Amino acid sequence: MIRKSLTVLVIDENHIRASIIEAGLREAGHEQVTVVHDVAGIARRIAEIEPDVIVIDLENPNRDMLENMFQLSRVVKRPIAMFVDRSDQASIEAAVEAGVSAYVVDGLRQERVKPILDMAISRFNAFSRMARELEEARSELEDRKVIDRAKGILMRSRGLSEDAAYALLRKTAMNQNRKISEIAQSLVTAAGLLDPGES
Amino acid sequence: MAAEHQINAGFIPLFDSAVLVAASEIGFAAREGVDLTLSRETSWANIRDRIAIGHFDLAHMLGPMPIACNLGLTPLASDTIVPFSLGLGGNCVTVSNTLWAGMVAHGALPDLDPARAGKALGALIRERADAGRDPLRFAVVHPHSGHNYELRYWLAACGIDPSREIEIVIVPPPFMADALAAGRIDGYCVGEPWNSASVVAGTGHIVTIKALLWRNSPEKVVGVRKAWAEQNPDALAALLRALHHSARWCQNPANRGELAALMAQPSVLGLSPALQMPILTGHVALGGGAELTVEDFFLPFGKAANFPWKSHALWFYTQMVRWGHVAHTPENLAIARDCYRPDLYRSALKPLGVALPGANSKVEGALASATPVGSAGASLVLGPDGFFDGQIFDPDEIDAYIAGQKLARAEA
């Protein structure tokens, strides 16, 4: 028997993460996937789409509104409940830790929903990892820029070579038990105060 | 020295999280050997989920929320108990300038009088209905909230059927003022500072205040995962003592400036300290230049504000029954009654020698003036605690109360 594929609605204000989830769902063979970024008018959209599964990020402040709407459901024709597999506490924890939750229409079998939730969990985690790495790369770049400026200030004001300027920054950082970028930032700030033309 | 107890707790950006925030930031928790880590959350659903899976041991919760949890009305419900209340009062009903102008045309005055405002609102609602206009839309923060129940109580007592004559939707507290300004809602009931936020923005008018609907009425509580409380009685007792000291500090007028600055921080509310002052002083700008001072607007400590009265839990339960959230059965009644735990409050605070109510329940709305009551330890003053419509809730006569309010709804 061929089962009708599930209709999935993804509610996520983060556009990039939403498209990562959407791509994952499509790769897994779910063709009926809708992504919504803004919950304004969500009741009408749900009435139109009639989703079997709703995937939502936990940071969305509208969860209370949505849960209330699912329960009252004058607009929503079929009752929707949170996906809770009581026998699988680990999966609930993984979902909350990843920052995602799923709501399903009543009567939908657990084994049909679980792969969707598992996929959402892994994509959410992948996204967080990616965002963290990006942030690290970004701050590394910032650090390098400020260190270069501090080196320039030392080279000009103390007549040091680039290597000597860096060595001085590193030695000061070690002595004060701080990061080189922090010492560099202090130097750049101080130089800016002493001579507005310098920074 | 490392703290003896590690406790993780969640809160929602509302002023009535102050006792928890101050306990953590001013050092009351540390003094009791508790390392209290607070996490700001964006929804009550998140608070519920993180309590259920053990991320949080306890949290800032809406008074009816733990009861709804224990009654199985919410997903991922876990047994939750209430050993401490975070204060009395603190909410307001705010409406758009357009709705306020309509109410004024029907006799409303900027005096916060709930009866007068309700009468004007009722007349306006009927006028709109006759003209074939859409029902007014009000927002509350959660279906199982003091806000939802007090808004409905007020409207029903003024002859307005809140289930049919208006629409009630859910909006997160920090979005209320924006939703009102954008015209998506006509009014809302929420805790401070999200009412004053609309007044300061010039987009809303405060029509009445929780303390005037039901003076000294319950609002937020500390909801604790029951399993955690049973496994960690010493940690819980230490925390309750810390919260007691924190609440006393929050109530002291000498600390208003420091508390306002603390709550204004970007990691807590992220709004100016000036916006925190109405709830601290009771001096409220209503909009359009009107100002009033309301007694007992918000009590984080006074009038036994932290005692988890079973009569408060039971009143919330009567409203759950009234608005169809739960059926009135002896089993459900027992669940509601057992949710609030004055015994835990008493045993934790007993070593401090402070005033402790001797009873677990009281007749709500019976005290017309401030009244000294029998208590263990020092003296204790309660009330006045009247409902604006003169009703009295006697928890021993709960069946009659529930039956009576059904009639009031049908007659409306």
Image (spheres, coloured by chain):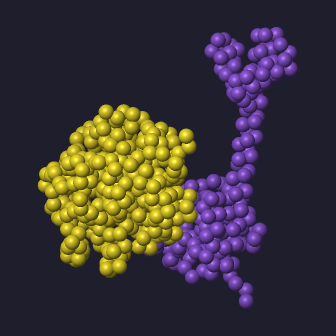
State the residue lying farthest toward the bottom. A1
User: Considering the image in quadrants, where does the C terminus of chain B appear?
Assistant: bottom left
* Left or right of B13 on screen, residue B255: left
Residue at left offset 71%, top offset 43%: A135
Asked where in the image residue B324 lies, by quadrant, the reply is: bottom left
Residue at left offset 55%, top offset 71%: A82
Residue at left offset 21%, top offset 50%: B380
Asked where in the image residue B137 lies, by quadrant, the reply is: bottom left
Colour-to-chain, purple: A
Q: Looking at the image, can residue B177 be seen?
A: no
The colour applied to the residues of chain B in this rendering is yellow
* Left or right of B111 on screen, residue A18: right
| Residue closer to the observer: B380 or B78 | B380
Q: Residue B360: horizontal and vertical position, in percent?
A: 27, 63
Q: Looking at the image, can residue B22 be seen?
A: yes
State the residue lying farthest toward the left. B368
| Residue closer to the observer: A105 or A19 | A105
User: Considering the image in quadrants, where does the N terminus of chain B appear?
Assistant: top right
Q: Residue B390: horizontal and vertical position, in percent?
A: 15, 61
Q: Residue A18: horizontal and vertical position, in percent?
A: 66, 59
Q: Residue B285: horizontal and vertical position, in percent?
A: 28, 40
Residue at left offset 51%, top offset 50%: B5
State the residue lying farthest toward the front. B351
| Residue closer to the observer: B17 or B356 | B356
